Image: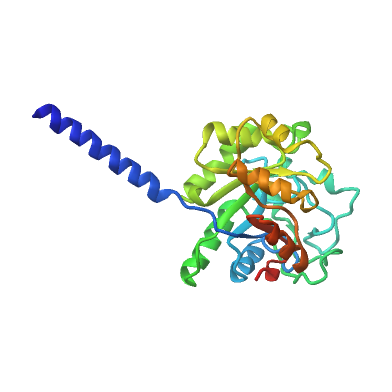
Amino acid sequence: MKGIFVKSLVCFCLFLSCSEMKSTSINTPVFDKQGHRGCRGLMPENTVAAMIRAVDLGVTTLEMDVVITSDDTVLLSHEPFFNHEITTRQDGTAISESEEKRLNIYRMTFLETQAFDVGMRPHPRFPLQKKVASKKPTLSEVIDSVELYITRNKKAPPFYNIETKSNPGTDALYHPEPRRFVQLLMNVINSKNIASRVIIQSFDIRTLQEMHANYPAVKTALLVEDFDKRPFDDQLRRLGFVPSIYSPHVDLVTAELVQQCHAKKIRLIPWTVNDKATIQRLRQLGVDGIISDFPDLFD
């Protein structure tokens, strides 16, 4: 009888464990409406204001980029330096293209990064973008701001699609090596208890491989440039595992690619689609989501 009791108790504990695992698993939306850098076409990119506006526009996923400061702060930024197109100094003077790469965020403390504004300079390619005084926010600040906003306004919790801005040629120059980058990023994500709503994306397969090896439950997305013409299967072999999402440039999407992804149960979510006609065409092809600078274009 004692043996039967112990066996039953073990089975019951396993049942509870599986139930808990199942309850913390959150499926991505049937069609994923992703706001690129928040909503770059409408608000300053990768800012708290852009993320809140995107939530109000009904996105299901907030897409963003992160870099690392010299004091290991995870900061939202598309480049690991201050881009001249969007940056001004405290006195209002503009950053020039010739000096931007010397403003290396990986060589700055978080406090030093806050000396620059990235929301007031008119964007040359996004004339509809509203100008809002903005500093580059930490990932922690963005998550806290969004989570508080959705709670107060009774909105659905979004996913966070976070790109690691790294490449093999600039390790230790503009960013830490992949293992350290991933560790710093996941420290923030785990501290906020949102790992079930996170996607880590990258063009740098090394960070995706680190994620898969050390945080296999977190969703990953392989980003693919428009000039990358290697066969789909070759790209997956190079990656070494099957990612949750395949995110190619919009020009690479074909009906065949949709079929290839779905055959391997990979979601296909292209970037960056900024007109309604293309959004509709891609939806008819069967893509699983779209990343857009203008999430107000989604139905």
Residue in view at x 75 percent, y 72 percent: 130
Residue 186 location, x and y as percent? Answer: 54, 42
* Count of numbered circles on the image: 0
Q: Quadrant of the N terminus?
A: top left
Residue 95 location, x and y as percent? Answer: 85, 55
Q: Residue furthest top?
A: 3
For the rendered model, the colour scheme is rainbow
Q: Quadrant of the C terminus?
A: bottom right
Residue 229 location, x and y as percent? Answer: 81, 39
Q: Nearer the viewer, residue 256 or 278?
A: 256
Q: Nearer the viewer, residue 186 or 100?
A: 186
Residue in view at x 58 percent, y 61 percent: 60
Q: Nearer the viewer, residue 67 or 19?
A: 19
Q: Can residue 286 be seen here?
A: yes
Q: Residue furthest left?
A: 1
Relative height, residue 236 to residue 111 (above, below): above
Q: Nearer the viewer, residue 225 or 263?
A: 263
Residue in view at x 50 percent, y 47 percent: 195
Relative height, residue 31 to residue 174 (above, below): below
Q: Residue furthest right?
A: 98
Q: Quadrant of residue 120?
A: bottom right
Q: Can residue 177 be seen here?
A: no
Q: Quadrant of residue 56?
A: bottom right
Residue 145 location, x and y as percent? Answer: 55, 62
Q: Quadrant of residue 180?
A: top right
Is residue 187 found left or right of 68 in the rendered image? left
